[in-house]
Image (spheres, grey):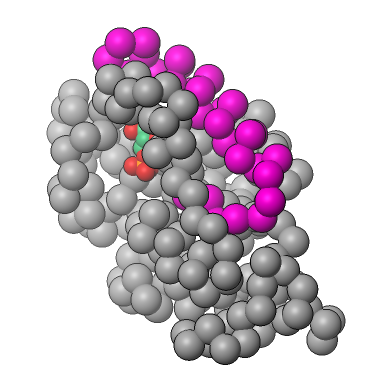
Amino acid sequence: MSARTTRGLEKSVVLVGMMGAGKSWVGRRLAVRLGVTFTDADAEIEAAAGCSIEDIFELHGESAFREGERRVIARILDGPPIVLATGGGAFMESETRDKIRQCATSIWLRTDIEALLKRVARRNNRPLLKNGDPREILERLLAERTPAYELADITVDSDTSGRDTTVETVLAALARHGEIDTPPKRDGKNTARA
Ligand code: S3P
């Protein structure tokens, strides 16, 4: 076990959870602390498709988006270990969930409705929130998706305590899970990873 601080992260860390859970924000900081690359699955899907997620939904529909999402996430996870933030629906797809289970450690950033609502209000480019009341949509999606999110390897609450605390909690959970030795310090002095 003690040799682990000198070894790189062996498996990718994949953040799952609802829109507005803070996956990208937390993922970026987590990657810095772990000394690996951060990748945002949605940004990769947009790059692969050559258009925005809104346009993919509008022009080709949600099932085409899910197909692209599945392919892009599988390709990313075949590469070297990274921190990957996934879109809120990715972990609902059983094939994607299996791929994540095989190749990575999954972390559900569990967030309550009030925190989600506050955070999704900052952006208006989420196609699933466009046709109706965001509270109703998020409540429905959260209820539908919670059983799948619960299958993640690790669950971390990401609503009340602030995002910096969430990053620390995720690092501590990864250490408990045996994916890293001790959580790397903020100054990066004991990171030595990847
Ligand atoms: C979606 C969440 C979005 C994006 C797409 C669909 C979802 O990502 O993938 O709009 O199904 O919840 P974020 O979770 O990063 O907002």
Q: Where's ligand 1: which quadrant?
A: top left
17 in magenta: no
> Residue 5 at x, y = what percent?
73, 81
Quadrant hosting residue 124: top left
Badge count: 0
Q: Is residue 61 above or below residue 126?
A: above
At 16% from the left and 48% from the top, the residue drawn is 121
Find residue 171 and report its horizontal and vertical position in percent: 56, 74
143 lies left or right of 6: left
Residue extent of the magenta highlight = 57-85
Q: Residue at x 26, y 34 (%)?
A: 126
Front residue of 131/6: it is 6
Where does residue 41 sit, x and y in percent of width and height?
A: 47, 40
Residue 144, placed above or below residue 19: above
Q: Nearer the viewer, residue 10 or 139?
A: 10
State the residue in front, 127 or 112. 127
- Considering the image in quadrants, where does the C terminus appear? bottom right
Residue sitting at 68 percent across and 51 percent down?
80
> What residue lies at 18% left-to-right and 55% top-to-bottom?
118
Considering only vertical position in the picture, is 112 above or below 185? above
Residue 134 visible in the current orientation: yes
Q: Report the magenta stretch's main SS.
A: helix
The picture places residue 49, in percent across and down from the top left corner, at: 42, 22
Whether residue 162 is situated above or below residue 143 in the rendered picture: below
Q: Quadrant of the N terminus?
A: bottom right
